[in-house]
Amino acid sequence: MARIYRAIWQEDRNDLERSAKTAFYNWVDDDRPLGYEFDSNGPIEMDVGKTRVSISAPTRVQIEDNVISEFIRHERDEIGTEYTTTFRVIDGSEKWIWVDVERDVPPIFQGASSFAECPEIVNKLLQGAKDPRWGQVRLKLNPSMITVQNHKGSCINLIKGWKREIPVIVFADIKGREPDTHNRAKRVCKSLAGTVAVQILHPGLEALFNREMDEGCGLEAGQARIYFPGERRPDEQRLLDREIVSLSIDSAAQQFARLLQPNMANRQLPEALRQVDSMLRENLGGSFQAKLDKATDVIGEMEHTIDDLRTELERSLEEEATLIGEIEQRDRNIRNLLDEIEKQQKEITQQKNMYTNLEDRTVGVLLSSPGNQANDKDIHSVRDAVKLARAEFSEKIVIPKLIDTTLDLLDDTTSSRTFGKRIYQGLLSLYRYADDSSQVKGGFKEWCMDGRFPYGWSAEDYAAAESWSVENNPKFRGQREFPISAEVDPQGKTYMGAHLKISNARPAPRLYFYDDTQGRTKKIHVGYIGKHLDTKLFNK
């Protein structure tokens, strides 16, 4: 038998043992054939359609001040697949509900999916629970709505909480389709009850949410993402695109269930339950031979688990091969785009005869968007770009003199002119955004992606915030605290996480700024222009 589902939680009902037993036999009664009567204190055998259902006589053991009740339901379908649901209730100084589902698949069906939805008993128990919780997270039968008022405490702090043991699933709602999103989220709650926390991001909050999250861990409208416990790389926080989410009401639940199945099936027992499990086995073990038989069963279960893990590994390798194929196709597309860029580059050279070397031609392509003014400016260095920006953009952009202390390092490189033109283009984009920000919802990224405004900046070269590891490292965070107008912060300085990526060529210059377009000054405040600041991966 291989475990495929595990739900464990604490709660505070005074009559937990009695309530849990009632819920279990109500679950059994839901399947009872017409006219069949059973005794809730003895074993039960009944046929439900083509499935044979067996209920073991309940077991009740008292160990010190804990009363442990165990109920077991065994099902065997027409093709021989067996499911065993073991339901334990610990009622004493601590109160626990513990549900395991195990599955035995005939050899000819070993390749079948190992996923099973949570048994209905879990939903029945949670409906009557008093303050059910998994660690510090409260379990709910319905998704939580995240709004502007509660997004920080109810969502961001929950996701980033280092003590969190439960996966969090967040749906990004689409304006006008709120009922569909709510139904999908409710379906996930029901399918994975007792194993996840589900939340819905109110339409229009994507920019605010993404600004708080680590880079690469955000959401766009219509998407959904799992945030696993612990600190993980962005690519490990699995994302479902809106196309998958919107396939059907069940599609998101099925996809998330497949991704979460190993996590929820292999959840480790809390210390209190490990002790109870050990004592329970000791009390019920009987003779040495019986204990030896149980040990043999455990070894058999572990062998099944190894087989399941091997199957999962093979599936992962197949997925990896598919991804490699997609990457190779993407590389071919990139080569085609580069060929097209080279063709356009030659046409520009013939028309304007402005570029005398490869560096100038590259800059021309980067800055060839309609209405772009950078090519028309006499910019030969980073200092030229900053000087020109101060003269032209002061109405909307504040560039303090302290910025000049970090420009020489950039101007001492062979790419000084390239950096200067890119910096001017970035400041031009910020200037236009500050002038147009009232016409688009969201922040600088949404303005760039809107498509209605010229002078936009590439979304791939903009980061709304630094990663969690940077923001929570005193050294790295301190490097990003820059002077600012007292109108913005009475202390005269503030932390700036938003930045433009000028180039990835060493010294990989960055432009940090603070967006106060919706604040008192109605301006963009530049805090830093210079080499790449320190991170865990970029630390000189």
Image (tube, rainbow, N blue to C red):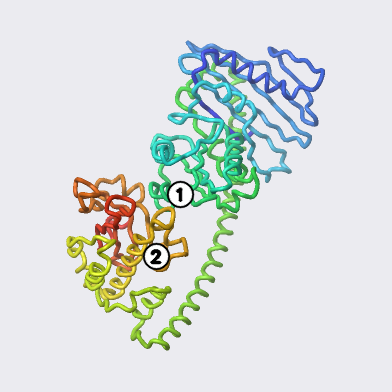
Query: Which quadrant is home to the N terminus?
Result: top right
Say how many tags the image has.
Answer: 2
Nearer to us in this view, 18 or 322: 18
Amino acid type, label 1: Glu
Nearer to us in this view, 42 or 456: 456
The percent coordinates of residue 385 (x first, y second) are: 26, 71
Instruction: Return the disc, 2 or 1, that comes first in the chain's sequence.
Output: 1
- The vertical placement of 418 against 140, above or below, is below
| In the image: residue 222, left or right of residue 345 | right
| In the image: residue 28, left or right of residue 507 | right
The percent coordinates of residue 12 (x first, y second) are: 49, 18
**Residue 303 in view, yes or no:** no
| In the image: residue 517, left or right of residue 399 | right
Residue at the right extreme of this rendering = 35
**Residue 55 in view, yes or no:** yes
Image quadrant in which you'd find residue 384: bottom left
Marking on residue 53: none
Q: Residues within 10 Å of mark 1 (few under 14, many from 20)?
A: some
Amino acid type, label 2: Trp
Query: Which quadrant is home to the C terminus?
Result: bottom left
- The vertical placement of 108 against 353, above or below, is above
Give me the residue at 26% from left, 53% from top: 480
Q: How crowded is mark 2: few (under 14 residues within 10 Å), some or many (20 or more)?
A: many
Nearer to us in this view, 476 or 266: 476
- Give the secondary structure at mark 1: helix
Residue bearing the label numbered 2: 457
- Give the secondary structure at mark 2: loop
The percent coordinates of residue 131 (x first, y second) are: 49, 23
Give me the residue at 42% from left, 87% from top: 351
Residue bearing the label numbered 1: 206
Give the Cα separation between the discs numbered 2 and 1: 19 Å
